[in-house]
Image (cartoon, rainbow, N blue to C red):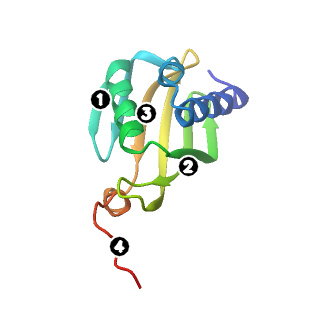
């Protein structure tokens, strides 16, 4: 069972690896059979599937930065409120808030569930130009 300190440290390392685009360091925190579920993409299984997902996000959102705003832990269960900011594909700034639930096993991430509003993501990532005032 992870201590609160260890769980928070793990999340901070995950955020740092994601923000620096160090996918090798990032996936090193995951078990090889990790499961990842999101409201946008459904279920993915295995570290290679998660790596592909992260690579895709870095490709379409090269300046995205995540920040863990709230981290709540209870043993091997970690709930994190995040904010992701950056510039969408047409150059408009965005900020999206979402929550991830991590299940840990032996100090690594065994499962991630991402909860976000698909409509908010679609609006933020819209390819349409925003009407000027």
Per the image, the residue denoted by label 2 is: 81
Sequence-first tag of 2 and 4: 2
Label 2 vs label 4: CA separation? Answer: 28 Å
Q: Residues within 10 Å of mark 4 (few under 14, many from 20)?
A: few
Label 3 vs label 1: CA separation? Answer: 10 Å
Per the image, the residue denoted by label 3 is: 112
Instruction: Determine the residue positioned at 45% across, 42% down.
Output: 62
Q: Residues within 10 Å of mark 1 (few under 14, many from 20)?
A: some
Residue 49 x, y percent position in the rendering: 31, 24
Tell me if I can see residue 8 in this picture.
yes
Residue 44 badge: 1
Nearest the eye: 96 or 59: 59
Instruction: Determine the residue positioned at 37% across, 37% down.
Output: 59
Quadrant in which residue 74 is drawn:
top right
Sequence-first tag of 4 and 1: 1
Residue 39 x, y percent position in the rendering: 31, 47
Most extreme residue toward the bottom, as rendered? Answer: 133
Sequence-first tag of 3 and 4: 3
Instruction: Determine the residue positioned at 37% across, 27% down.
Output: 50
Label 2 vs label 3: CA separation? Answer: 13 Å
């Amino acid at each position: 069972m992870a201590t609160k300190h260890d769980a928070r440290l793990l999340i901070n390392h995950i955020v740092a690896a994601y923000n620096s685009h160090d996918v090798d360091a990032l996936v090193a925190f995951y078990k090889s059979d990790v499961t990842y579920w999101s409201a946008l993409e459904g279920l993915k299984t295995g570290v290679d599937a998660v790596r592909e997902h992260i690579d895709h996000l870095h490709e379409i959102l090269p300046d995205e930065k995540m920040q863990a705003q709230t981290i709540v832990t209870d043993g091997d269960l970690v709930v994190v409120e995040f904010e992701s900011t950056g510039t969408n594909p047409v150059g408009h700034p965005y900020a999206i808030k979402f929550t991830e639930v991590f299940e840990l096993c032996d100090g690594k991430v065994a499962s991630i569930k991402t909860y976000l509003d698909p409509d908010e993501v679609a609006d933020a990532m819209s390819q349409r130009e925003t009407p000027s005032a």
